[in-house]
Image (tube, grey):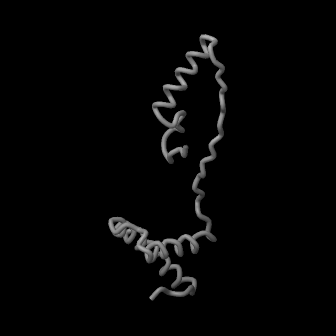
Amino acid sequence: MTPGSRGSIPKWCSATCRHRAWEQARAAASGLSAVEVIERRVEVQVPLVPTRRDWPRLLSDLAARLNDGRVYDRDLPALARALEPVLENYRRRAHLTGAPDLD
């Protein structure tokens, strides 16, 4: 069972499993069966804030995804709006520092 990316971690995989667990707990309370409690640890990856060394790889990955069509067309306008200030600021810094321009 793979937990979702949001919300609490499910205790049971289905309503059937939940009902069976209830039946077993009820039977254990009456002394008719044993219940084994299993504790589990779930590791969730937390996205890290990109460092200066991560940006070239991330932008390259974005370019590859755009080229392969792995970015929805409906997301392109928002992506264009987000890229405009990036390009403007890069051009400003490139002019001041002598870094390559993007003409």
Q: Position of residue 12 (x, y in %)?
A: 52, 34
The residue most toward the front is 32
11 or 100: nearer the eye? 11
Work out whether residue 10 or residue 57 is closer to the camera in this orientation and state it.
10
Q: Residue at 57% across / 87% down in the picture?
A: 98
Please give the name of the residue rendered at 51% of the width and 31% of the height, measured from the top-left corner.
Answer: 17
Compared to 24, does 8 lie above or below? below
User: Picture coordinates of residue 25 (x, y %)?
Assistant: 58, 19
Q: Position of residue 86 (x, y in %)?
A: 46, 73
Q: Quadrant of the C terminus?
A: bottom left
Which residue does the image show at 57% across and 21% down from the upper left?
24
In the image: residue 78, left or right of residue 56: left
Q: Quadrant of residue 34?
A: top right
Q: Is residue 100 left or right of residue 87?
A: right
Residue drawn at (60%, 13%) of the image: 29
Residue 4 drawn above or below residue 55:
above
- Residue 13 sits above or below residue 72 on the image: above
Residue 76 picture quarter: bottom left
Quadrant containing the N terminus in the rendered view? top right
Please count the marks in the image.
0
Tell me if residue 88 can be seen. Answer: no
Figure quadrant of residue 28: top right
x and y percent of residue 31 in the render? 64, 12
Q: Is residue 70 visible?
A: yes
